[in-house]
Image (cartoon, helix red, strand yellow):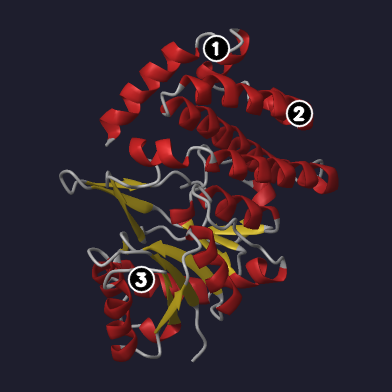
Amino acid sequence: MEKILTISIAAYNAEKYIEKALSSLVCCKMNELEVMVIDDGSTDETFSIAKEFELRYPKTFQVIHKSNGGYGSTINCSIERATGKYFKQLDADDWYHTENLDSFLHFLENTDSDIVITPFYKVFEKDNHKEMVDSHSQIKPSSQAIDSIRLSDRLMMHELAIKTSVLQSNDIKITVNCFYTDNEYVFEPLIHSDTVSRYKKPIYCYRVGLDGQSVSINSIRIHYSDIKKVAFKLYGLFNAFMLSEGDKNKGKYYILKRMIQIVTIGVYTYYLATGDPIVYYNELKKIDKEMRQKYPSIFKMTFISKRIILLRCSNFILAPIISKKMISERSRMF
């Protein structure tokens, strides 16, 4: 049977959560699913739990064990092997809304858009409160040109199903051994996509508030420099897009520009979150200078955040004050 959707599951020491993630994919049309569990060098029972699903549902689940390479390496591994018409990711500590999965597969079978967007749920760990995020309701179920849409908010990886041929034919690879690569996962396929449609029901359930998540204050303080790697990769891709087709695709340009602005805000936010003056004053100041020299047009378009404006206009003298306030705000989230 032809596979409609390949689901890539990044799994690293996820024994506490992975059974829920995999169980959520057991549905009536599951033979149309190709689920690749990429065990990224786990040292707990993640692999054996996933293997049980492979034994029970061999036409759907595949478990691949490899040495640890980080999130991007799991996506790359799945893209290389994927045979589904569409490709979607799932983190091992999240899950899908099973009740909508059959009709989602039917929708994917009958569309030909390069990208399909869906709403998703944020599920807050502290009280299990669930909140639907539906930021792109203006996009129609029927396929339409990306250049014709105007998005009011950023695109997030939890919302996307991407045509596998877009990923494979453009040899899209995500940076390995690096955090915050979800920005790459959205940005680069978008450059190579022309059409989009929207499935109106939520699919992805995104767990929020786990200590150790990449956006928690503790994780940011360890991995803050990774956001710079991602940002400068996107700057290069954006520059290349502008040189080749920026004037011809105003709608896509607007979406990519907004993503560039958001990831740049992330760079400043994460460096400030370290609370370390050497990091947020010396290192961040060097990044700001490098951006201005290498990507002057991007530097100009990132005068978007009040904090960035204050930092630049004060020659980073206000960094300690802004850092303290930002840490307080971020800590309340987790």
| Residue ID at (79%, 42%) | 242
Question: Which residue is disc 1 drawn over?
Answer: 310
Question: For the view shown, which residue lies furthest in the right direction?
Answer: 243
> Is residue 62 among the parts visible in the rendering?
yes
Q: Nearer the viewer, residue 93 or 65?
A: 65
Bin the neighbour count of mark 1 within 10 Å (Cα to Cα): few under 14, some 14-19, many 20 and up: some
Mark nearer the viewer, 2 or 1: 1
Q: Is residue 81 above or below residue 332?
A: below
Question: Which residue is disc 3 drawn over?
Answer: 101
Residue contact at pointers 2 and 1, CB within 8 angstroms = no
Question: What amino acid type should be assigned to the residue bearing mark 1?
Answer: Leu
| Residue ID at (77%, 32%) | 294
Real-space Cα distance between discs 2 and 3?
42 Å
Q: Position of residue 278 (x, y in %)?
A: 51, 22
| Residue ID at (32%, 59%) | 94
Question: For the view shown, which residue lies furthest in the left direction?
Answer: 127
Q: Position of residue 315 (x, y in %)?
A: 61, 10
Q: Earlier in the sequence, mark 1 or mark 3?
A: 3
Q: Is residue 171 left or right of residue 86?
A: right
Element type at mark 1: helix
Q: Position of residue 252 (x, y in %)?
A: 68, 45
The image quarter containing residue 126 is top left
The C terminus sits in image quarter:
top left
Q: Position of residue 53 (x, y in %)?
A: 30, 83
Element type at mark 3: helix
Question: What amino acid type should be assigned to the residue bearing mark 3?
Answer: Leu
Real-space Cα distance between discs 2 and 1?
19 Å
Real-space Cα distance between discs 1 and 3?
46 Å
Mark nearer the viewer, 1 or 3: 1
Q: How many marks?
A: 3
Question: Which residue is disc 2 drawn over?
Answer: 297
Bin the neighbour count of mark 2 within 10 Å (Cα to Cα): few under 14, some 14-19, many 20 and up: few
